Structures are given as structure tokens and as C-alpha cells.
Amino acid sequence: MRTILNKPLLPSPFALAILLSVFAYAVAYFQTAPASSDNSTPYAIQLLLFWEKGFWELLDFSMQMMLILILGHVLALSAPVHRLIVRLTRLCTNGSVAVAYIALFTCVVALFNWGLGLIFGAIFARMAGEKALKEGWKLNYPLAAAAAYSGMMIWHGGLSGSAPLKVAEAGHFLEQLTGIIPLRDTVFSAMNISSSLMFVLLIPLFFRALGKFLPAKPYTLEPFQFKTQSATFDGAEKIDNSRLLGTSIGLVFLFVAFWKLYLAPQSWMYQFTPNFLNWLLLGLCFLLHGSLYELNQATESAMRDGAGILIQFPLYAGIMGIVKYSGLVEQLSDSFVMMASTDTLPFLTFWSASIINIFVPSGGGQWIVQGPIVVEAAIQMGTSVPKAVMALAYGDQLTNMIQPFWALPLLAITGVKGKDILPYSAALMVLGFCIISLVLWMF
């Protein structure tokens, strides 16, 4: 997807993060440098210190987002999830039905966890492709892969959405501006529920229609190797293969999670934070993998696919440090206020977030960079902050359909090329733009 006719359109996301850091530094220098200063430290060096300060401020947030990605991926590689996909594959009896079911179940799973939804969809598409070859019915396999990627256009309105999860946590980096915003005002708001339902209904119908009218092309597939590598355990190492131990640990994790919800002094939605989600996911990983060995094997696989984003989070935090401590965030917020009205600010946020996502593919990274600007503008204009948060989330997820970064694990599993799914995912992005614009206008 990063290429058309095999010519790169964008540098790697890591290179983009560095270029954006340089750009933010240059803008801050020319926009916020004081005419005179009593500080003996040159302003150019002050900005570097702001960058360094921001670099380390959000390490907890970076770790939270990485765990959401990795644990969701690990969960998708568990045997029970594989058995579920096998059962769902039985519903696929022809090409148009197959792509519709792939899109439907991928979107539903992505609302729980986007990492799980991405890998779940990729494996589902791969197994549906194998079934079509075995049974002799026609399937547009690149279309099936695109359907498996569709969950990335709905995820940020779900339970693993970076922005709504973070503002629901006590002590988040914008709490002084926004306070704590529970999920009932973001993920479970009438606006977002309406948006999610429209996506879950219309995306499968979109792929069903394409599956009926687009011709199928020949393809070949080797059987998907799901099982982790076997190993021999001797002596004390046998504990790594103990299913009793792994299952027991998983049950303890889940017991603690549900006990906290049971004893919650407020609505359970105040308890649903990034830490709580990761605790729940880790418990499910222990429970569904069973043995420590299988869990470790799946984690190593997930880490390989998630390594590219790990080092980018500090860079995004450094950008936040520059715009925050230089005063640039106030200037950018004032520009937002000048360009928008109370009614148009959510649309402006949505459109700008769609563009920024192309250059900052991480939802968590984008919230770090753009969140302070959007929140400050919403507060100045008296616009609903939860709506502004979700408008940013919608923009972030929309252009995933033409952003290559998160498609890489899916492409590796399905074996298709990015340029093969780009026409379908780009068309889906147009549908998503219409749905989100309608929802923002209605609410």
C-alpha cells in the first residue's frame, strides 16, 4: 500500500516521525521565539530541552498502547480463537458471502481490540481463501484481504481506542484541561454507538456488493501454519508447559478484573482504562494459551510485528513537549478557533486528524501530538470535549485505509500485496467519510 507501481509514495513511519520532529522544532522556533529574553540559554537550545523533557513524560502511555497492540495480537494467535475462525469459515459458501462475513466479524472483534481484530481478520481471510481453493468456488482473494483490514476503520470508537481510553484514566496528561471523561461520554455515547452500528451494518454490505460484481482472479496459497513450534521439556522446564499453571494465572487475572468492577464505587465505565484493558487482555492470553511456552511463542511473534512502532512513541512525545512548553499549542488552538465555529469544530478536527494520520499512523501517537490542540480549542469555544475527542478518533481511523503501516502484518499473513487491496480499501474510506460526516452532523 505504500507503493503504487512499485514506487514509494512515503518514507517509513519511523522516518516520518523524525521529519515531523524537525518540522515541529522549526515551526516552534520561528513562531514562539521571544524578541528578547533574560534566559541565558539560547532559545534553540531551550527547544531541544523541551523536546527532551517531553520525550520521557509519556512512557507509561507508550507502554499502555504497545501492550494493547501486542496482547491483542497474542490473543489472536491462541488455539481457541483459531478454532472459532475455523467454525466461522464454514459460513463461507461463495465469494460474496465470504467477504461479507470476513468484514462483519473483523469489525465486531476490532471494536473489542484492534490488534486482535487485525490478526483475526487476516487469519480468517487466509482460511477462507484456502477453503475456496479446496471446494472450488470463486473468491476475489485481494477483496477478502481488504475486508479483513476493514476493522482498522472502526477500532478507535471501540474499547481499545487510544484517545477515549486515555481521557478516562485518572492522571492522564490532559486531565487539568478535560478532567476525567468516562467511556459513557465517548465510546458509549449515542453518537459513537450510532457510528459503530452503521459501520458494522454497512461495511459487510459494501463488501457483499463488491463480491457479487467484481471478477475473481486466480491465486495460490500454502496451508496456513498456525500451531506454534513444538518443544521438548525436561526437569524444571516442564513448568513452562503446564496448562494448569497458565490457566490458573489467567483465572486470577480475570477474577481481579471483575472484582474491581464489582466493587467500583462509581460506574464501571470509570474503571475501564488502558491499564484495566491490558490487565483483562493479559488474563485472557494466559487463559486461552494455557501454557507459558505457547504464550511466549505468540508474544515473540507479536513483538516482531509491533517493533516498528515502539521507538516512535518517544518521538511523538518529544513533539508534544515542543508544542506544549514553547507555547505553540496555544497558538495552534487559537488558529483552530479562528477557522471554526462551535458547529464546525468537530468537522475541522475530523478532517485534520484524517490528514495527520497519514503522517502519524499510531492512534496513540496522534493523540499525543494533536490531542492538546483539539482539547484547548474545544474548551475555548465551549464545544463538547468528548465529541472533539471522538472526532479526532474518527479521523485517525478513517485514513488507515490508505496508510500502509498497520496493513503490514495482514499482508504477511494473507500473502497479498498492498497495491492489490488499495483500490478496495480506498473505496471503503469514501464510505467511511460519508458515515462519519453524517454522524457528526446529526449529533
Image (spheres, helix red, strand yellow):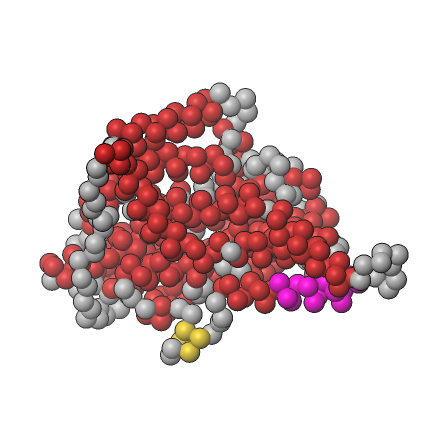
Is residue 26 shown in magenta?
A: yes
Q: Is residue 148 above or below residue 231?
A: below
Residue 434 can be seen in this image: no
Q: Is residue 269 above or below residue 396?
A: above
Name the side, left or right, on which 114 lies relative to 167: left
For the N terminus, give its image quadrant: bottom left
Is residue 195 shown in magenta?
A: no
**What is the x, y in percent for residue 357?**
52, 60
- Residue at point 49%, 64% (across, down): 13
- Residue at point 51%, 23% (across, down): 264
**What is the x, y in percent for residue 143?**
29, 63
- Residue at point 62%, 63% (across, down): 21
Q: Main secondary structure of the magenta part?
A: helix
Name the side, left or right, on which 336 lies relative to 106: right
The one nearer the camera, 386 or 273, is: 273
Q: Quadrant of residue 382?
A: top right
**What is the x, y in percent for residue 165?**
52, 41
Name the side, left or right, on which 285 lies relative to 327: left
Q: Residue furthest front?
A: 235
The one nearer the camera, 20 or 122, is: 20
Residue 314 can be seen in this image: yes
Q: Is residue 254 above or below residue 167?
A: above
**What is the x, y in percent for residue 137?**
14, 62
**Bounds of the magenta segment:** 21-33
Q: Quadrant of residue 134?
A: bottom left
- Residue at point 69%, 39% (across, down): 176
Q: Is residue 423 above or below residue 161?
A: below
